[in-house]
Amino acid sequence: MGIKAALPKYEIYFYNTVLCLAMFWASSRIFDLSSSGANRKTFKTSVTPGYFGRKMDTADVEWMMWFSTFRMHILFALAGHVLFAKICSMLAPQYRSLVCMVYGLLAVWTSMGWTYVTLILSHCILLYSISLVKIRWLCFVSGLCTLATFKCEPFVSWQAGFVEGDFELRHVLFYGGCGFTIMRCMSFALENCERKDGNYNILELLKYNFYLPFFYFGPIMTFDKFYIQANKSDLTRKEREMWNISLQGLSHLGVVVVVNVLFHFLYILTIPNDMKLLKHASDWALVGLAYFNLVYDWVKAAVMFGVINTVSRLDHLDPPKPPKCITMLYVFAEIHFDRGINEWLRKYVYDHLGGRHENVVEELVATLCTFGITVLWLGPCQAVLIWAFFNCLGLNFELWTAKLFSMEPFASVEMAMPEATSRRIRAIFNTFNFWSIVLYNILALNSLDFAKLVAKRLLLKGFPVTTIIVMFVTYCLIQVIKERERRQALIDDPDPLPPAAPQSAAATAAAAPAAAQPVADPSKAKAE
């Protein structure tokens, strides 16, 4: 079945209508649940007074830190970076990456202290020294061992002692700066192994690592891309590029406002932590909470990375794009909440070990290694291990299923049926895949108890009514996604025009004398 397989318009309109009604109904159930539980004791710490005469869900510390508590500090630091980078680009563009490194180094020094800077520099020097040997596996093992020192005791406590002061952001900045530093140093070391003539200078590593917009919160650009873009001499912009950057910044601001308004009416982050309340919630409220939690996590990642990407685009960089919306995902192969980490893992692990991703054994080894590094990156714990296991299983199961249905007689059966029918059948299988993705990922975002409760209510306690209705709504969602992909495919790769019908010899002979005659009225010929 091709991606361009079309369905009748009325069928697509029906799917959109069902989807909108289902979203509205689930939102109303969550709103009722939020209003009835606003004064519960378990809500006191995370539901605080807000605007519109209502309380606001403040359970996500990371969101509140970025857009409420420390927004002025973050804006001040990023604004200073933009100002100095712009002045340098105008006066001495060849030194702009060096100026950005110095500003980033001073900003980290000011926020975390000189001992923290010393710790970061020691890791950079260590991994740079190992990269000079140009042994790929040694660089990889050294980087992973260094990353592990930030995930297990007593190394974590010892290194955390290098941070001066005791402020609220200390914990977040420490782990963010150290973790991303190790991943950047590994990228540098692996790219240095690939370089055939000489080695990169350690100054290039420091420029790469201490670029402030990426330092604490990512995303990660692989070193090869950063090196080319940060050292390019041509700083001219494309037509309307500044307009697009400004529009991107304003859109992120609008999303922040919308999310903060919704937090006054839908307590989607606090409710999953109250298991007593959830046991009395309706099936629609539970299903909606699971879905909206994943959508919110994507929105948060898209906005946070989007703000940083806007700043980096002002520096003439092309940063990793925001993650693909969970609403548009129905296959495990496209799941990622951080496109930078995803591209890093793909380049250095998944594609390197998996080859063309056609061999079952190679794919299994590649996915096991990829999710093993992901577990180390996130921090090993029960929820992360279960999440990694099921996502790894889902990714491999997709390959096994694709292999099976590419064989006879399945391939011949699908080729014989109309494309629209094939699309509908595939959407049915994708429906179950979609809810597997949702259930597996709320393990990492919420809790194991919440995931078990949603699965039990959806598949067991709510069977058959809730199960059938939710799966039908999800089927409508899958068809809406496929329709969007079909339209995008037609834009990216339009179908060729059909060849003109060949003329017969008699018609050609009859047309020849007419063509040879002069045109009496040129304006009439033009109009025709």
Image (cartoon, rainbow, N blue to C red):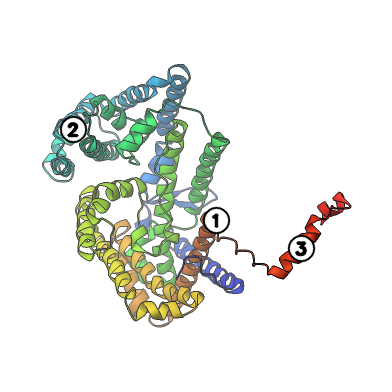
Please name the amino acid that badge 3 sits on. Answer: Ala
Q: Are marks 1 and 2 in contact (CB under 8 Å)?
A: no
Q: Neighbour class for label 1 at 10 Å: few (<14), some, many (≥20)?
A: few
Reading the image, the residue beneath label 3 is 511
Q: Quadrant of residue 13?
A: bottom right
Question: Which residue: 48% across, 19% down?
Answer: 90
Q: Earlier in the sequence, mark 3 or mark 2?
A: 2
Give the crowd class for mark 3: few <14, some 14-19, many >=20 residues within 10 Å.
few
Work out which quarter of the rendered image holds the C terminus and state it.
bottom right
Viewer-nearest residue: 384 or 447: 384
The amino acid at mark 1 is Ile
Q: Nearer the viewer, residue 260 or 431?
A: 431
In three-dimensional space, the C-alpha distance between marks 3 and 2, rounded to whole angstroms, equals 81 Å
Q: Is residue 277 left or right of residue 25?
A: left
Q: CA distance from mark 1 to mark 3?
A: 38 Å
> Which of disc 2 and disc 1 is earlier in sequence?
2
| Residue sitting farthest toward the right | 520
Looking at the rendered structure, the kind of residue marked 2 is: His
- Residue positioned 47% across, 32% down in the render: 314
User: x%, y% of residue 280?
Assistant: 38, 72
User: Which quadrant holds the N terminus?
Assistant: bottom left
Q: Mark 2 = which residue?
A: 123
Q: Is residue 74 above or below residue 367?
A: above
| Residue 410 percent across, percent down from the top left | 36, 79
Q: Kindly indicate the quadrant of the structure image that contains residue 412.
A: bottom left
State the residue at coordinates (23%, 24%): 114
Give the residue number, with chain letter if any, for mark 1: 491
